[in-house]
Image (spheres, rainbow, N blue to C red):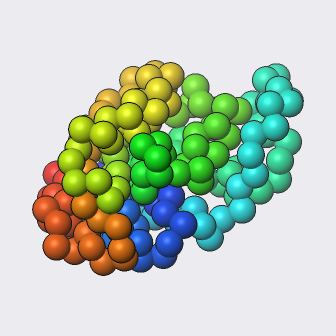
Amino acid sequence: MRKRVLIISASPRKGGNSDTLCDRFQQGAAEAHHHVERVFLADRTIGYCAACSACRGSGECVQDDDMRTLLESMIAADVIVLATPVYFFGMCAQLKTVIDRTVARYTAIANKEFYFIVTAAVGSKRPLERTMEGLRGFTSCLTGAKEKGIVYGTGAWEIGDILSRPAFEEAYEMGKSV
């Protein structure tokens, strides 16, 4: 069955390690004949949630920025891939901003499959579980969210480091398995 896959690359560096893993995931998913949409957050203008609660009644955020279309894409997707570099064992600010801004319609992001891509300079997965808990904090608030896989891109500091790591092929295979 052909699925709608939304890949959200939160890397601030085009071609950075987490962004490169998004490329590989996308290649695999496209080869498996899924419809893939990719969003590079650094190319978007998305403001912080102002906690104004204006969205409570209307389900619409009062901010007129790129989050409106991204949220529609999240709602329409069957599969959502959240990719982030890890800074101080947490997701990057760009991804956290997107998660916070879903508040207007987060209940409509229901019954989705989630894949996660996390990259960090550390050489082991264990410290990245702190990052995963933050991401799971989001998905635990969504009805019917199913965690389907994680790519841990460890030992990647400089751009291109990920090319020689196992995560490079893991991302491709995970994309194919969607």
Q: Position of residue 17 (x, y in %)?
A: 35, 68
Horizontal placement of 122 versus 75: left or right? left
Q: Position of residue 152 (x, y in %)?
A: 25, 51
Most foreground residue, 87 or 85: 87
Residue 48, compared with residue 30, is above or below; it is: above
Most foreground residue, 58 or 132: 132
Residue lying at 54% horizontally and 66% vertically, measured from the top left: 12
Residue lying at 30% horizontally and 77% vertically, measured from the top left: 160
Residue 58, compared with residue 93, is above or below; it is: above
Most foreground residue, 122 or 149: 122
Horizontal placement of 130 versus 68: left or right? left
Q: Position of residue 28 (x, y in %)?
A: 22, 65
Residue lying at 59% horizontally and 50% vertically, measured from the top left: 93
Say whether residue 67 is visible: yes
Q: Position of residue 110 (x, y in %)?
A: 47, 29
Most foreground residue, 70 or 92: 92
